[in-house]
Image (tube, rainbow, N blue to C red):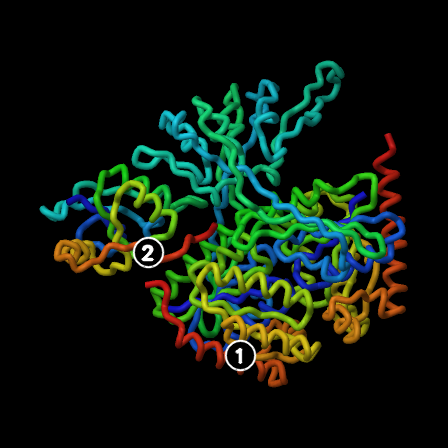
Amino acid sequence: MKVAISSNGKTLDSELDPRFGRANYFLIVDTDTMEIKEVKENIQNINLPQGAGIQAGKTVADCGVEAVITGNCGPKAFNVLQAAGIKVVTGVQGSIRQAVEKFKQDALQFSNGPNVQGHWA
Amino acid sequence: MKELTIISGKGGTGKTSVTASLATLAPSRVVIDADVDAANLFLTLPHEVLETIPFEGGHKARIDQSLCIQCGECVDRCCFDAVTKSPGQKSPGQDAQDFVEEYLIDPVSCEGCKVCVHFCPADAITFERQICGEKYISKTDNGPMIHARLGIAEENSGLLVSQLREQARKMAKDHDIPLIITDGPPGIGCPVIASVSNADAVLIVTEPTHSGIHDMVRVKKLADQMNAAVYLCVNKADLNPDMTLNIKKFCSENAIQFAGEIPFDRDVIESMKMGQSLVQFSRGPAALAVEKVWQNVSEYMKKTMNRLL
Amino acid sequence: MILTVASGKGGTGKTTVTVNLAAIAADKGIQVFDCDVEEPNSHIFLKPENITSREIGTMVPVVDKDRCSLCGECEKICQFSAIALIAGRIMTFPDMCHSCQGCVMVCPEDAIISGSRVLGTLKTGTTPGGVDLTWGELRIGEAMSPPLIKQVKKRIDPLKLSIVDAPPGTSCPAIETLRDSDLALLVSEPTPFGLNDLALTVEVLKKLNVPMGIVINRADTEDTQTGLLDEYAHREGIDIMQRFPFSREAAMICSRGEMLVDKMPEMKALFQELYGKIALKLDTIKNREDRP
């Protein structure tokens, strides 16, 4: 399965970025092979005056992932991901490798809603 | 790490004075001045500016006069009345009939929507991100202070507040600081929402006046919408004891933790003049009352769950 | 003509000055506009009757899915992420929208219809003394107050004398309120915070080209800070038009939502004097404008 993980760096040993909309990178990982399929820069969204969550949601939806693993996901990003049929796991910490391993062992639960509020309206 | 935001609805109830004292009493904290267009905290907390960072706000449109063909398309398209036709520069000796008018975009009115840029048939409109102010990272006795100065007649105060809070969270995380205290702006609009969003708790500083109570009720509703725990203290409480009683009643009926009342005390202004926080400057009745407020607030905060990871 | 009462710092007495001036000038057919739509308070003091109330909205896009061809042009022009093409469908985020109409203008299929987001309510009423009051009340949770302020200001009759109560601060809401004023009255208090924020507001008004005068509230002639305010006003060449002394009694009266001009004759005299000076100043400004 292809998943997107918000990340501080570009490798499996990088730390998961708790922010979704303003994450540094998204790593697109194939959970079966543990291979990084794609590294998506998110720098253009970090500096957006507003709507970073929406744009980040679009970015990962365009990568054709089935799930997103992140720390905090706001209401607008959650709506976008839901509309794109992407499942979301929030509240994850640690390295990208640990996050994917836990995900594969079904140790992570999909969220029913956003776990934080927007950064500003 | 927990975040406490101080708000009031009505301006001038004493948010900044209370914040400065709490920031002095908290053993280790990051303090933010989120009232970015009328920042005052720096005047009452001794500090040293360590770093100055330019603040990039939104984009603004600007017409390149050498490319403009005077068609007026931008005037018709702008929903913010930002484009005006005005007399251009007349060079000496130029005849009246050769004298051209210029289309100009008022940067204060420009919303940054890019509609004029898109529709300009001569591609004469540029669209650039503006530097709208400065952010500061300062050092104080018991932790960093994050503050800013919004440029004159600049906007994007909500964005600036979000960036200050992001910076504060990063510093709190890097230096293992357990508490962020934010001095919020008055009102209930954009920068207030940006100050309260994702805070664990808000402390409402109100005053026993009709206006104070009216505004406190509105700001409490906002805090409820944002799911923050709500604490409240009454400043200048002895000014109208009956109204202070009414406020306390409102608190108990609306699940607000009452954090204390602060009497009117000239030491508040005296400490401000000395550039110090009240508790640093004075041992008078107001200072002692603020210490009590701090004890209550930190007690309540212990019981409030961490909202962010 | 428009007189706007502003301050930068909150709680310096803008509303107190606005409502008491209005009471003094009630027989001159004066109108009051409370543009502090986030926290309007003038009505607490003026106690208007026959209140009318209407909801004010702002345009947001609604997509007609039958006509939409999913071309994505709307998303490209939107600078606020209020409309986006996601996984083969158009999604809108009404609370992000700034109502620029860009998406409506670019849509090749005319598939975007104007919907509405509630900004707040616009209220009007008349005081027993005959003062017309118009005020806005921003919906709690709404971030953008300037469009509602614009709606309040639209009701200003340019032929009458209007007093506008401005919001605190120096950014968008204050600017929206202050622009096009004929005169700004800056209510300041002799404290370091008051002086700091007064100076910021003066800079804004210079940029907006609005003439100004200063009122010192809670003034104390023995006090060094009042001296600093005097010095600042002198340096900037701005008139100090009145000084209201610090008074516990006045604070009590205001806390109950009552009018100083009704309860304290000495305050009434000061307001009358202030109104006289304002009327003179507005006359001078008007004559200057009328000159060819």
Residue that mark 2 sits on: A72
Q: Quadrant of the N terminus of chain C?
A: top right
Q: Is residue B263 above or below residue B58?
A: below
Residue that mark 1 sits on: B293
Alpha carbon distance from label 2 to label 1: 32 Å
Write down the quadrant of residue B246 in the picture. bottom right
Q: Where is residue B184 shown, x and y percent of the image?
A: 54, 62
Chain under disc 1: B
Q: Where is residue B200 shown, x and y percent of the image?
A: 42, 66
Mark 1 neighbour class, 10 Å CA radius: few under 14, some 14 to 19, many 20 or more: many
Q: Quadrant of the C terminus of chain C?
A: top right
Q: Residue at x 86, y 38 (%)?
A: C288
Q: Is residue C238 above or below residue B64?
A: below
Q: Where is residue B93 shown, x and y percent of the image?
A: 75, 18
Q: Is residue B256 left or right of residue B215?
A: left
Q: Residue at x 66, y 61 (%)?
A: C10
**For the residue labelled by badge 1, is the local secondary structure a helix, a strand or a loop?**
helix
Q: Where is residue B108 shown, x and y percent of the image?
A: 61, 40
Q: Is residue A74 above or below residue B232?
A: above
**Residue B139 visible in the current orientation:** no
Mark 2 neighbour class, 10 Å CA radius: few under 14, some 14 to 19, many 20 or more: many
Q: Residue at x 32, y 51 (%)?
A: A20
**Residue C52 visible in the current orientation:** yes
Amino acid at dot 2: Asn
